[in-house]
Image: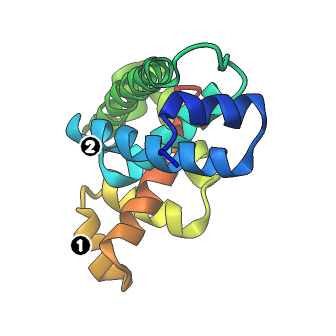
């Protein structure tokens, strides 16, 4: 018996709701998507998050009559573009906040900066305690994930994962994702 192609797996997974085909399709394509994202500079945690978001977007939109991989790559590129745009907005927001919090009072930088800082603070305060601490240490105090891990007695991948989840939650709260 020959190994089924990605399109054959997609047809079975989407058309026939075959759980074995779903698993094989996911395993086969995730490695391809992961490699593409890592090649484009995404961290492991970010790549995993983006792939998960890609699958969420594919499920309601895929027609098994179309080739799967080109369709999935277009969706993945959209997800990556959305993430990069949100990342730029997020970085810009934090640069404003850092400048405001270190060098001036809210009145010196205008109502918009003060309002952004207040929204940001509200969003950060909604995070679980560990994520909040990692987020503040990384963003406000500019510590590396490695140094935060040493300080908190956790592994660097655990801290990086908390940081990515916290950043994602804050972006959602701010309406940037």
Front-lying residue, 21 or 172: 21
Residue 173 lies, in percent from the top left, at 61, 36
**Relative vertical location of residue 129 with respect to residue 176 in this rendering, above or below:** below
Q: Quick check: 99 left or right of 73?
A: left
Q: Quick check: 164 left or right of 127?
A: left
Task: Say which quarter of the image contains residue 13.
Answer: top right
Front-lying residue, 39 or 172: 39
Secondary structure beneath disc 1?
helix
Picture residue at 52% right of the left edge, 36% below the top: 171
Q: Which residue is mark 2?
A: 38
Picture residue at 35% right of the left edge, 62% below the top: 137
Outermost right residue: 16
Residue 159 lies, in percent from the top left, at 39, 68
**Relative vertical location of residue 97 with respect to residue 164 in this rendering, above or below:** above
Q: How is the image coloured?
A: rainbow
Q: Which numbered circle lies on residue 67?
A: none
Secondary structure beneath disc 2?
helix
The residues bearing labels 1 and 2 have C-alpha atoms spaced at a distance of 24 Å
* Residue density around tag 2, few if under 14, some if 14–19, many if 20 or more, within 10 Å: some
**Relative vertical location of residue 150 with respect to residue 174 in this rendering, above or below:** below
In this view of the protein, can residue 121 be seen by the observer? no
* Residue density around tag 1, few if under 14, some if 14–19, many if 20 or more, within 10 Å: some
The answer to which of marks 1 and 2 sits earlier in the sequence is 2
Residue 161 lies, in percent from the top left, at 43, 61
Q: Which residue is mark 1?
A: 147
Picture residue at 27% right of the left edge, 36% below the top: 99
Quadrant location, the C terminus: top right
Front-lying residue, 37 or 165: 37
Q: Nearer the viewer, mark 1 or mark 2?
A: 2
């Amino acid at each position: 018996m020959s190994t089924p192609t990605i399109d054959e797996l997609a047809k079975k997974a989407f058309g026939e709701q075959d759980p074995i085909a779903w698993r094989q399709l996911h395993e086969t394509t995730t490695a391809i998507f992961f490699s593409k994202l890592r090649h484009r500079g995404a961290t492991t945690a970010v790549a995993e998050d983006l792939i998960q978001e890609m699958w969420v977007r594919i499920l309601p939109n895929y027609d098994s009559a179309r080739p799967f991989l080109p369709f999935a790559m277009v969706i993945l590129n959209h997800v990556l573009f959305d993430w990069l745009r949100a990342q730029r907005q997020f970085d810009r927001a934090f640069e404003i906040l850092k400048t405001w919090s270190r060098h001036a009072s809210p009145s010196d930088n205008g109502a918009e900066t003060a309002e952004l800082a207040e929204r940001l603070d509200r969003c950060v305060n909604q995070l679980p305690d560990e994520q909040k601490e990692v987020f503040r240490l990384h963003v406000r105090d500019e510590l590396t994930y490695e140094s935060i891990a040493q300080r908190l007695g956790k592994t660097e991948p655990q801290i990086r994962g908390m940081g990515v989840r916290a950043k994602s939650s804050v972006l959602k709260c701010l309406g940037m994702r």
